[in-house]
Image (spheres, coloured by chain):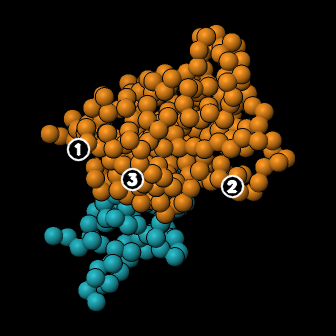
Amino acid sequence: MSEQNDPRVVVVTGGSRGLGAGIVREFLDDGSRVATCSRSATPAVEEWASEAPDRFLFVPADLADADDAKRFVDAVIERWGRIDVLVNNAGVARDGILGMMSDEDLDTVIDLNLKGTLYVTRLVSRRMLARRSGAIVNISSIVGISGYRGLTVYSATKAALDGLTRALARELGSRGITVNSIAPGYLRTEMSHGLDEDQLQQIVRRTPAGRLGEPADIARVVQFLVDPRNSYLTGQVIVVDGGLTS
Amino acid sequence: MASPRIAAENVIREFLGRIKKDPASPLDAPLYADGVGLDSLETAELSALLEDEFGSDPFSSADELPQTLAEVLDHYGAAVEAEAV
């Protein structure tokens, strides 16, 4: 089988649970080879490893550590020789008023959400440059656009990802590599657990779609952005929030 | 089989031809400006291409960035000598 007919190689960071798991699931369902990482395995990861051992790779890694990021990317290259799609999904939230936030919490959010994303993207974009093709999707958030009380640091990192998207799209566009962001609204996943039930109900009331988002809502947009037929779409932030910020 | 240095030179000259630079540039030509004329993105592309082909490249792993084609190739020549020791 020629490389052109091989299943594409997709890297999804932080794919062991929540939104990342939904994105991994969607790519496995379409026949892609999928690599993901997180600090530890979950039942979902173990299920995929037994369900699709030839098409699934999990590497325990803390992407806030540059060496771990390199170990992860090297493992993907060793296994499949290339990377066609990168979805930067790994992220962490620490809620609290900025004036009360510890140095440790501030570092945790910035180190994973921003520096971790840059570490992985630096390594993967080199591989894509060498082949002059690829698609990168950064999972940011509507709080990076509209802000949210108590999520100042998280919002700052997500806004930074949108800046990364625009700059990198300009940098790599001439080499056939697209870079886009998806800014999800509030999802029914672990990341929303920092919000209490009243807050979630308030969000639902204000959302034209009348519900919280599901990982599959976002995963389908990821699929659209990395479709080679959509190579004219780059440097954009696609808001997927049920109309909340419209 | 070609030595890593010769293989690297072949990869570089093919790359230069593909990006519309002079594939016959002399080895002592500076990589940038009035020499070979690589810009920053083309340099990154060459660095990535060499790493992809040979597992390492002088732009990422050397103490000082190479300034000429010969200095790029020295990275692969030196690797051969080290292996022979």
Q: Nearer the viewer, residue A14 or A132?
A: A14
CB atoms of marks 2 and 3 within 8 Å: no
Residue type at the position of mark 1: Asp
Q: Nearer the viewer, residue B12 or A122?
A: A122
Quarter assignment of residue A224 = top left
Quarter assignment of residue A71 = bottom left
Q: CA distance from mark 3 to mark 1?
A: 14 Å
Residue linked to disc 3? A59
The answer to whether residue B59 is above or below residue A182 is below
Say which chain tag 1 marks. Answer: A
For marks 3 and 1 on the same chain, the one whose residue lies earlier in the sequence: 1
The answer to whether residue A179 is above or below residue B9 is above
Horizontal side, residue A170 vs residue A205: left or right: left
Question: Dot 1: what SS?
Answer: loop
> Which disc is residue A169 wearing?
none
Q: Position of residue B53 (x, y in %)?
A: 31, 60
Say which chain tag 3 marks. Answer: A
Residue at left offset 37%, top offset 32%? A25
Q: Position of residue B66 (x, y in %)?
A: 48, 71
Residue type at the position of mark 3: Val
Residue linked to disc 1? A54
Q: Position of residue A115 (x, y in %)?
A: 60, 53
Q: What quarter of the picture does the N terminus of chain A occupy? A: top left
Quarter assignment of residue B11 = bottom left
Q: Residue furthest front?
A: A197
> Which disc is residue A107 wearing?
2
Horizontal side, residue A33 vs residue A243: left or right: left
Residue at left offset 34%, top offset 52%? A76
The answer to whether residue B55 is above or below residue A58 is below
